[in-house]
Amino acid sequence: MSSRTKKIVLIFVALFGLTALGLYAVFGCPSLWARDFAVDPAANAHLVAINGLTAENAALEFIDWNIPVYDRVPRERISLSSSQGSSDAPVVRIYCPEQDDSIHCSFYEITLSRQQETWTVTRLRRCWTGRGLIGWSTSTPS
């Protein structure tokens, strides 16, 4: 193989790798696209009234606290992961397939703070996929 052919193959491999990385960033990595949203004080007041929740259950309760039970996405359809920055301030990431026709999937990144036996939300980051949107977005779906 000549050196020119090697250079061309190397360029194609690099372009393929960059394209794959770009597609992963747009479609597979929602935390890059999530932005901060205001934390609802009423939701935090609701969380403070409930004792003994795990961080994951507190994050789910924060999201669903004012949604009727029959409209909530079933727990088995929700994907949860948490990382312990510290035991009193975990970050919970939630992938939630929505039941709405305009939003397909929502991503929440919730930073919690433990105060004695209760949790409060200190930071809320969100993004979603939906009708008329390409990849993860915080724009309004069509």
Image (cartoon, grey):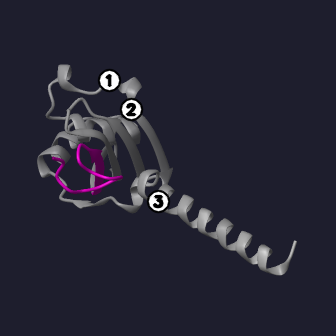
Measured in 3D between alpha carbons, the distance from the residue under mark 3 to the one under mark 2, in whole angstroms, is: 21 Å
Q: Is residue 129 magenta?
A: yes
Query: Left or right: 66 with respect to 11?
Result: left
- Secondary structure, mark 1, is loop
Amino acid type at image mark 2: Ile
* First to last magenta residue range: 123-142
Q: Which residue is mark 2?
A: 78
The structure residue drawn at horizontal position 26% and vertical position 44%, both measured from the top left corner, is 130
Measured in 3D between alpha carbons, the distance from the residue under mark 1 to the one under mark 3, in whole angstroms, is: 28 Å
- Secondary structure, mark 2, is loop
Q: Pinpoint residue 14: horizontal percent, then vertical percent.
A: 65, 70
Can residue 85 be seen here? The reply is no
Q: Pinpoint residue 138: horizontal percent, then vertical percent.
A: 24, 56
The structure residue drawn at horizontal position 41% and vertical position 47%, both measured from the top left corner, is 93
The structure residue drawn at horizontal position 14% and vertical position 25%, both measured from the top left corner, is 68
The furthest residue to the top: 70
Depth-wise, is mark 1 or mark 3 nearer the camera?
3
The structure residue drawn at horizontal position 36% and vertical position 35%, both measured from the top left corner, is 57
Q: Main secondary structure of the magenta part?
A: loop
The furthest residue to the right: 1
Q: Which residue is mark 1?
A: 74
The quarter of the rendered structure image containing the N terminus is bottom right
Q: Pinpoint residue 4: horizontal percent, then vertical percent.
A: 78, 80
Amino acid type at image mark 1: Pro
Q: Is residue 79 above or below residue 120?
A: above
- Secondary structure, mark 3, is helix
Task: Pick the residue in front: 26 or 86.
Answer: 26
Query: Left or right: 136 with respect to 132?
Result: right
Q: Which residue is mark 3?
A: 25
